[in-house]
Image: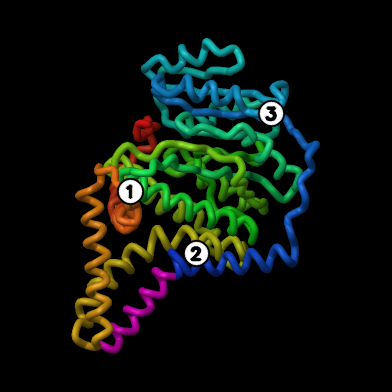
Amino acid sequence: MLQFAEIIFWLLIILVLYTYLGYGVVITILAKIKQKIKPEPPFNPDFEPAVTMIVAAYNEADWIVEKAKNMLEIDYPREKMQIIFVTDGSSDETPQILESYPEFTVLHKPERAGKIAAMERAVTFAKNPIVIFSDANALLNKLSVKNIVRHYNNPEIGAVAGEKRIIVAEQDSASGSGEGAYWKYESYLKKKDFEFYSVVGAAGELFSVRKDLYEPVEPDAILDDFMISLRINQKGYRVAYEPEAFASELPSASVEAEWTRKTRIAAGGIQSILRLLPLLNPFKYGRLSFQYVSHRVLRWTLVPLALVLIVLLNILLIDYKPLYNILMVLQILVFSTAIAGYFLENKKIGFKLLFIPYYVVMMNLAVFVGFKRFLTGKQTVLWKKAERAKQ
């Protein structure tokens, strides 16, 4: 009995280590080999297609002027840019503020149907072959558009994911420190994913698609940006990653706000897996299936369960061998650090490593809650104003 428990214990350890660390090592090696065999084609500096930029803004009156100025500072030929703000459902001054800018097309209706419906309505007004989506609370670097569109000179590329950067202070809260560290690692993985084959799911803060490949998602889709980009993958196109096109935003205002966001992502992850089942077929999708399962599916399915089972099996194996007593102590230390992060969540301290265990534990707990919300249909798709920290 204990021997069987020991085997399962180590298999689960391997699964968790592979998902969070091992895949990073593997994809780094594979990307290096692939780039030696078939490097990415050089960029054409004269390639400047016309673009339509779409920003969904719901009740963003406190932030929208800064976003509007940021959009006007983008370094790209103005005659080749169409900028659309869609403010459907906003009940504050967001639409009126934007209408004072003649450079923008402002779409507004009082009915609130959610971000997906707002984005899809805006796409119908897009005049140009390249569409770039950005969130209202994210600021783009000046060369973001130039750096995104250069990928489209390669006919293999159907979409481009920009980089999400979290503005982290020298001393920050649990949500800020943990979120910042997480996105730095995610950005690295996305870079290597693209170098090997394709990014697996774009983030809504900044991503772009060829308009003729854009496919509306189901009205109840929770992770619309993720599904839009992966369905472009399903059509045989790659999703590029461009770290020099980045969207900077403040971290979540609190751990509670980040918890809400993570449970939503977890619920959306389960929904996406069920709606993208063909991508689990390696015989059809090959490299993409490997990346999709390793980078996304395991995090939203087996790994959270594995972490719980590891604790239970370790308790069962105490005194079976001295090693398991040591491992139990290490687990207690990790969870104690996570608990400390919980109690210090709103204390801005310089020792950021303290908050990483908390953030990881929170992410995995959020998967269980998100899964429950998905099963019970309690996860709304209605567009909510993001609660972000103050500068």
The residue type indicated by label 1 comes to Gly
Secondary structure under the numbered disc 2 in the rendered image: helix
Q: Nearer the viewer, mark 3 or mark 1?
A: 1
In this view, 61 is above or below 128 = above
Q: Is residue 379 magenta?
A: no
Which image quadrant is residue 283 in? bottom right
The residue nearer to you, when weighing 212 against 74, is: 74
> What residue sits right under mark 3 in the picture?
76
Residue located 62% across and 68% down the image: 30
The residue type indicated by label 2 comes to Ser
The alpha-carbon separation of the residues under discs 3 and 1 comes to: 39 Å
Q: Is residue 377 visible?
A: no
Say whether residue 240 is left or right of residue 89: right
> What residue sits right under mark 1 in the picture?
350
Q: Quarter holding the C terminus?
A: top left
Residue located 40% across and 53% down the image: 270
Query: Which stretch is magenta?
Result: 1-17
Secondary structure under the numbered disc 3 in the rendered image: loop
The residue type indicated by label 3 comes to Tyr
Crowding at mark 1 (Cα within 10 Å: few <14, some 14-19, many 20+)? few
> What residue sits right under mark 2 in the picture?
294
Crowding at mark 2 (Cα within 10 Å: few <14, some 14-19, many 20+)? many
Secondary structure under the numbered disc 1 in the rendered image: loop
The alpha-carbon separation of the residues under discs 2 and 1 comes to: 33 Å
